[in-house]
Image (cartoon, coloured by chain):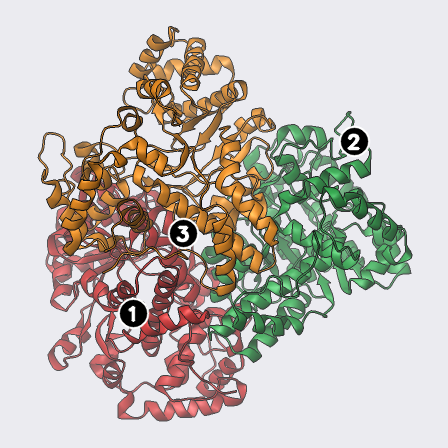
Chain colours: A orange, B green, C red
């Protein structure tokens, strides 16, 4: 079957709306990509080594693909992932064939849309991926990847990326970013993600804090020294381009304890005596500390709460994290954020971007909060909601209360480098579709929609992330 | 840029549905406005003094406008609001210019739709509000407000309002309503809102109860006398036109304690020893008491739960309530209402109207409850959800289980007098849009839709509020 | 007024989408009905006696109808339902007239759509049900029901039902199914619903367990014997055609206790000393036990949580269950199911179908869970959500994460035999509408949509229920 990206894809079907959407999208289609939050590997750009093959490039790093195949009874071993002390399929072409045979499972999911976009626009493939075309795909991709034009830096240019943020843990030496700053003018920056040193539920928490002290020359065993060490580390990340921090806590809880309480709590969690309640309270306090530091050093703060990580006990034991077993849970914001907001909520010079996996908060809590507090902005539809329907739900449930200026444009949030153009293309098309509906129902004028689509695609992320 | 209200605004874009919507709307466009719940100031109509200027008329009383501007870093002082012991901008024209310059922030929000409707239809303005037209707006509005035709009573007639309910606290002397009853035949009625005397978390609760006793000649320090005093006060409100009560509790919790428990609980909360749990239990019990009184005196009862009032600690301290810092929280109804429903749920002569800020309850709890209990009806999409998308979500999530007859038409629920025609226009158009979709997808016949749009716009609110 | 089923009913209005939907639906319209979960009475088919009249056939068994009429102030007595020790209207024609006069209350609800379908297609009625046509309806229906062609078995053929599952309690002798197996080749199978013997909150729990022991010859007073008895009973049900079990617990909680803890817990709940917490823990443990047995015996397991049964205290006391007073409450899955999933989640040979009345879980918890765990699949939109909007919300919120293959097609889940064709017709049309939208927005190719509509209508339920 032929593979063809329709030029009107994702636009409304109604001819009036479609033509408005087309016109709006045309105004932003060629804008450079601003990718302020994601998980690509900086080493790709530092080394600029060729990517290897279709299987390792498309399948292995993509938890969306792994989870769906696994849900349908395909073992991770059959997909080439080696369990702790176990064996896995190593024939990458055979794995690719298996994937191709099951590609129909992704019908109706954004994975299919992203992959088809990469196949068609990056590799020029014009037939659909299925069992019969698996080898052709594998060969075309292998051949292309062996060329100079498919090296990471060349693709970065070809993808028209203006800035790409990666995400690193607080203890990361940022060696790749240091090299990139020296020998390339593509803008790949880091993001400060300190979960490993502020979440006492992480297995190596105490050791991580010790390492934090060592790296910064601070006595990180005292509350005071620990905070100094974190400030020091934030400065180190800023020196490597970071303009933002990111926090992936179990909930959005914040706290504002006295200094004495903080010291005692810190002692307890460091001693490993913490129960779940202490760890939660410590994370809560640390979000407020991070907000304070952000108010001081000007970094934008991102909060991504509400994922139950590594829900599948057996798979986690065998394969570790990031194989698709993270499942959202219900979260709240109005009460959870109050301690932090009581201290910093009215600071217009501070930017805290809230994300959610629990869409019930869009209209109920997030839009009212962001539509009031100067420090708050709303991140785009995240993860499972980064999809045509998910993005439309976000706009429809958020805009009427928070407007557009309290949102921050799109995040691709991906490890899948080749999907970045696809994801921005999709997001811009859905924004065009949404705005076209507002125009066609006379809730917005056409000139305003033109202005807004440019802000959503480009200006808002630049401003919110201070890029 | 021109300002123009499109005659097909808010209707579906599809030509088939649009033409049905147009036809349905035409049947109700000219119907008088029934406004059974809102927050306009009765003094306006009692005094019939001219309104002052654009800034004090449109901006200051509108928490939707204040919150959005504040969220984008504009101080309330710059908007002319004086903090406790502090100063504010006093140049109303300058404030209006600031608002005009930032009017683009309201794109995509209902505030924009309501304001444009008032600007165009009430003041005949035909250019968009922006920095360049700020003075023209200010002058046109000032000039108009100085004329007889723009006095409150004249506008009440011009807006084609059949009845307008205001909301007053239980201790209000209702002097304006008394004057209105004497010297005007426009129907402006009050609503009994006893939060100040039944919510023990209110700062002056004990003093309010004392005042309640004084006003009614009852010994309000005993449970029995307190209830008598409330009954007395309800009668006083009824004598001033009230047909309904309103209850803005933190949750929808109800209770049904024994008389002895009530007396002890009342003593505790009155003594100010109440913790949060006692206050919540007391509110819960009082909802059931209010239902009992409603079953006796025939007043319709409205419950508006789930707003975290005055969430912004600093702003509340400086500016007091109603500056846009109320944020919704999650609420439940099925379990919360059971004690009340166990006593009065099967009374078909009692009407309790439920509202929500937590849309997750529409399909899950509210529609099944209202679709079963004779005493329950559903209020329209409230507050942040009083918007095109919000109203459509309400209809789509409620109708299939509760039908239309268990809903009560539209409430404008506003302090913004000039927005009343705009809000009813919008609500009628959205109902027309929703019904048009049912007709065009052959879920409803055209003659039925004609009947229903009239009920939604006029008969249902009259019946539910006994107007 | 004429009654006419429009051939394009429930399809999108846009001509492009409508034509795609029409084409997709045409491919499945004539497929046999697979009804893997429902509540029809097996005695109908065993006895093959004629149905009596319109009132007893359409009104009395339909809790959707009873609840709506009751909500509008009609007493159940007036509808012919006798309260404990009380009287009710017995004139069935008079009751039918009352229903006809109030039939307008069902506008916008699926009940109206289902009934009109049955009236038009099964009885050939061509005028709308209203006061003026009540008698004509009553007579036409009575006349038809008296004929051979309207006997249950004849209608089963006429409705083109391939397989119909009923639901019986664990203690049911399955006499009707036994007769059916002997003397008819229509496939009516049972489903094992053991709530009465595993939910300690059921009033006769201990007596039921005793009866379970008696029926199976096991010592059901010991934990070991109790489990053996349940296994025995599952085998008995399988021998009567059952391929599935069903569990209607208050929550989705699961537990995985040690054998010693189980024995102690079982002793406590059997002794009737259990508080609510013990009963909940016991239900939680029993879901895990049922999963274990399902993994052993190959039965598909259905979980229908989150209904607050018999919410209306007074009606329950007077009329018992199933008169429309079940109201949903909020539920969670991610944390609730973990104990069960830790043990059986990775079994690809086990099928557990999850349902919900709390739609907030569709995108947040259910789609991510089913899109990862091999044992999990998602049941269709259930109960109050088995409606045009409800089914669309299900597809739109589930598909992007879980795809189609992790869903199981449609369940009619009804006691209303005559509505079965209507419900499958509606479900197939809505699936066609949803797929048409994907095709028209270029998220799916047309050939894929054709394949998928067949899976949704026929293959997926056959596979998931092992039919």
- Judging by the rendered image, the residue that carries numbered circle 1 is C39
Closer-to-camera residue (A87/A460): A460
Residue at 72% x, 52% y is B192
Closer-to-camera residue (C108/B94): B94
**Residue B56's quadrant in the figure?**
top right
Residue at 59% x, 38% y is B279
Dot 3: element: helix
Residue A134 position in % (x across, y down): 16, 50
Residue C277 position in % (x across, y down): 34, 43
Residue A138 position in % (x across, y down): 17, 45
For the N terminus of chain A, give its image quadrant.
bottom left
The number of numbered discs placed on residues in the rendered structure image is 3
Residue A214 position in % (x across, y down): 33, 8
Labels 3 and 1 share a subunit: no
Height in image: C438 above or below A174? below
Chain ID, mark 1:
C
Dot 2: element: loop
Pointer 3: residues within 10 angstroms few (<14), some, or many (20+)? many
Q: Which is in the foreground here, disc 1 or disc 2? A: 2
- Judging by the rendered image, the residue that carries numbered circle 3 is A388
* Residue B89 image label: 2
Labels 1 and 2 share a subunit: no
**Residue B302's quadrant in the figure?**
bottom right
């Amino acid at each position: 079957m032929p593979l063809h990206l329709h030029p009107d894809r994702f636009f409304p079907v109604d001819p009036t709306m479609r033509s408005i959407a087309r016109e709006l999208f045309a105004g932003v289609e060629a804008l450079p990509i601003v990718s302020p939050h994601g998980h690509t590997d900086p080493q790709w750009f530092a080394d600029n080594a060729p990517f290897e093959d279709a299987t390792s490039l498309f399948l292995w790093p993509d938890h969306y693909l792994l989870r769906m195949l696994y849900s349908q009874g395909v073992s991770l071993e059959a997909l080439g992932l080696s369990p702790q002390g176990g064996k896995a399929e190593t024939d990458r072409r055979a794995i690719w064939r298996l994937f191709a045979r099951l590609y129909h499972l992704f019908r109706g999911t954004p994975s299919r849309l992203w992959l088809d976009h990469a196949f068609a626009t990056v590799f020029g493939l014009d037939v659909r991926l299925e069992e019969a075309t698996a080898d052709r795909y594998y060969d075309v991709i292998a051949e292309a990847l062996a060329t100079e034009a498919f090296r990471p830096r060349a693709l970065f240019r070809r993808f028209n990326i203006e800035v790409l943020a990666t995400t690193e843990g607080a203890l990361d030496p940022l060696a790749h970013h240091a090299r990139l700053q020296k020998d390339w003018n593509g803008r790949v920056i880091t993001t400060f993600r300190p979960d490993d040193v502020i979440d006492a539920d992480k297995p190596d928490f105490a050791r991580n804090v010790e390492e934090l002290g060592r790296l910064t020359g601070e006595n990180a065993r005292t509350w005071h020294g620990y905070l100094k060490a974190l400030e020091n580390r934030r400065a180190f990340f800023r020196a490597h381009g970071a303009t933002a921090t990111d926090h992936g806590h179990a909930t959005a809880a914040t706290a504002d304890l006295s200094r004495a309480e903080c010291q005692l709590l810190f002692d307890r969690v460091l001693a490993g005596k913490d129960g779940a309640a202490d760890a939660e309270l410590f994370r809560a306090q640390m979000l407020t500390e991070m907000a304070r530091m952000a108010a001081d050093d000007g970094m934008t703060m991102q909060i991504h709460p509400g994922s139950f990580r590594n829900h599948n006990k057996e798979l986690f034991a065998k394969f570790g994290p990031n194989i698709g077993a993270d499942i959202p849970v219900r979260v709240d914001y109005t009460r959870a954020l109050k301690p932090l907001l009581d201290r910093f909520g009215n600071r217009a010079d501070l930017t805290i971007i809230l994300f959610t996996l629990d869409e019930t908060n869009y209209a109920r809590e997030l839009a009212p909060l962001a539509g009031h507090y100067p420090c708050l902005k709303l991140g785009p539809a995240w993860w499972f909601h980064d999809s045509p329907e998910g993005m439309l739900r976000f706009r429809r449930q958020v805009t009427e209360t928070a407007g557009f200026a309290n949102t921050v444009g799109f995040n691709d949030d991906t490890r899948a480098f080749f999907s970045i153009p696809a994801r921005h293309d999709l997001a811009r098309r859905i924004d065009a579709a949404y705005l076209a509906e507002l125009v066609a129902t006379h809730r917005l004028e056409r000139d305003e929609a033109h202005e807004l689509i440019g802000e959503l695609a480009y200006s808002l992320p630049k401003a919110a992330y201070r890029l």
